[in-house]
Amino acid sequence: LTLTFSRFVNSSSFNSSYFLLQSTQNSSSNITEVISLYGSYIMSDISDLIVTLRLSDELLNSIKLLRNLCTSVNNTFLSLLPNGILDTVGNSIVPINSESAIRVSQFLADTRSPEILSYQLDVNRGIIVFTFTEAVDVLTLTLSSVNLQSAFHYLIAQESFNLTDG
């Protein structure tokens, strides 16, 4: 996430929890989803006007679980509480009210597909637990596309079993 300020800022005064992403320009809407950038840190400051943040994996996963937040330019807005960051002489940058949040100017959609990192199988209880590289929508998991087999490659597997939906 790259932020461009109108005044020079002191990047060491950055307080991530004061920066909020919200799904609508006006947070008083009943359907607004809001999340704090808590846990983010400044990855680089190109100048005293442009700051690049690194969002934590936990924050990215939380954002991905919110269906109406940060999926396009139409639902990615930023608000800023007072004292979120200071200018180079110690003054607070003017807050951005949640009732008039700023729309993202450039948006790059998530195009990376999640991958299964590992799984655990409990045949006594009939449970399989998948661990993915990122948060996933469990409603989109198609169990019939999962195949358990006795070898790493399907051509040499002696046994194979397709899971069923339901």
Image (spheres, rainbow, N blue to C red):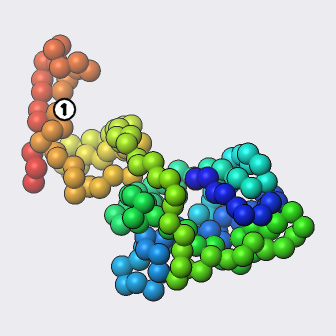
Q: Quadrant of residue 130?
A: top left
- Farthest residue, direction right: 89
Point 20% across, 43% down: residue = 123
Foreground pick, 149 / 143: 143
Foreground pick, 151 / 122: 151
Point 27% across, 41% down: residue = 121
List x then y, in percent, for residue 95: 68, 77
Query: Would residue 166 appear left or right of 108 to someone viewing this image?
Result: left
Q: Amino acid at mark 1?
A: Leu
List x then y, in percent, for residue 45: 74, 48
List x then y, in percent, for residue 124: 20, 46
Foreground pick, 77 / 157: 77
Residue at image mark 1: 148
List x then y, in percent, for residue 14: 74, 62
Decide: is 62 above or below 93: above
Q: Quadrant of residue 24?
A: bottom left
Mark 1 crowd level (few <14, some 14–19, many ≥20, 10 Å Cα): few
Point 41% across, 42% down: residue = 133
SS state under label 1:
strand
Q: Can residue 124 be seen at all in this image of the molecule? A: no
Quadrant the C terminus occupies? bottom left
Query: Would residue 132 appear left or right of 147 to someone viewing this image?
Result: right
Decide: is 151 above or below 66: above
How many marks on residues? 1
Query: Would residue 55 appear left or right of 29 to someone viewing this image?
Result: right
Point 46% across, 64% down: residue = 76
Q: Can residue 158 be seen at all in this image of the molecule? A: yes
